[in-house]
Image (cartoon, rainbow, N blue to C red):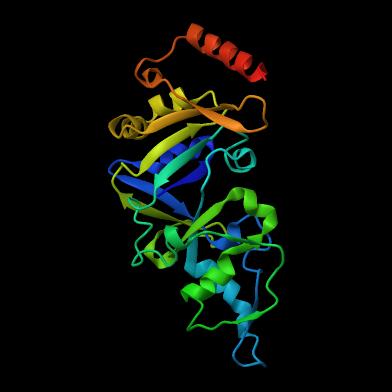
Amino acid sequence: MILYKYVPEETLKLFFDHDATSFKFTPVGQFNDPFETYGVSFASEDEDSLAHLTFRSKINSDLASLCLSRSPLEVLMWSHYAQHHRGYVVGIDTELAGFHDENLCLITANEGGIDYLDERDKSRVIISDKNFKNKDIVKKVLFRKSQHWKYEKEVRIVIESDKLIPIGDDEEDRFYIYKAPGTNIIKEIFIGINNEDFELTALENDNLRNGILDNNIKIQKCCFKRGTWDLDKTDYDMSLLTDWPSADFGILAGVISAFEKNEI
């Protein structure tokens, strides 16, 4: 299965790490939706206990997620997560990455589709130290979002944080890295319609450039879909990575791009 990650310019090269592919997993407390984990109410087995109020913090510290999308051409996603269309979308083979492995993932890619709901669930989830990592509980807590977010077509992979590499001492800003063996996990790269730096980025980073060329990663450039407000894609000229373009070519490419955008 191929799923997609929207990333800014500087993040693209971080995927390629010599003989591995690196993925950033983030605690839910750092997500941009204030309703995260609040799609349901928590309750304790003991009606007089307030212990259930601590479990959002425990979920934040003990679990981390990689958020992907089923679609690489969502205009709002490019604006919000890919540096205003100057970044990239990376197509990931989730099986090669290990994200179908139930021994690694608490929630695998096959199980990770978000449920977009009109209303928050009025029922209460009885939560405790014994069950807060239970798959059914996690699905209720982390996989229910408002219909406002349905354009994201999101799929989440959830891994317990103690299986990942922690980055950062401050818990509020801490994230985690998972290194999947192999560099053939990335299958596609989409270049944002406003991105003019791909060649320079690739040529300045050997891991990125070699990863693309050695694994025949398909590169596509986003463009306007004529007559609509949607994005389309066109095949990228791979010779631009092997033959650094001249200044004259860069000017010509800009003129061609402006001309194509103007045509409805």
Q: Position of residue 19 (x, y in %)?
A: 27, 43
* Nearest the eye: 252 or 109: 109
Q: Position of residue 42 (x, y in %)?
A: 63, 79
User: Total label count?
Assistant: 0
225 in relation to 43, above or below = above
Locate residue 255 relative to residue 105 in the image: left or right: right
Residue projecting furthest to the top? 248
Q: Position of residue 252 (x, y in %)?
A: 54, 9
Q: Quadrant of residue 40?
A: bottom right
Tell me the residue at 41%/45% (across/down). 92
Tell me the residue at 41%/37% (across/down). 188
Locate residue 235 relative to residue 60 in the image: left or right: left
159 in relation to 221, above or below = below
238 in relation to 131, above or below = above
* Nearest the eye: 55 or 95: 95
250 in relation to 70, above or below = above
Residue projecting furthest to the front? 227
Q: Quadrant of residue 117?
A: bottom right
Tell me the residue at 56%/38% (across/down). 73
Locate residue 220 relative to residue 263 in the image: left or right: left
Question: Quarter holding the C terminus?
Answer: top right
Q: Position of residue 127 (x, y in %)?
A: 56, 82
Tell me the residue at 35%/46% (across/down). 21
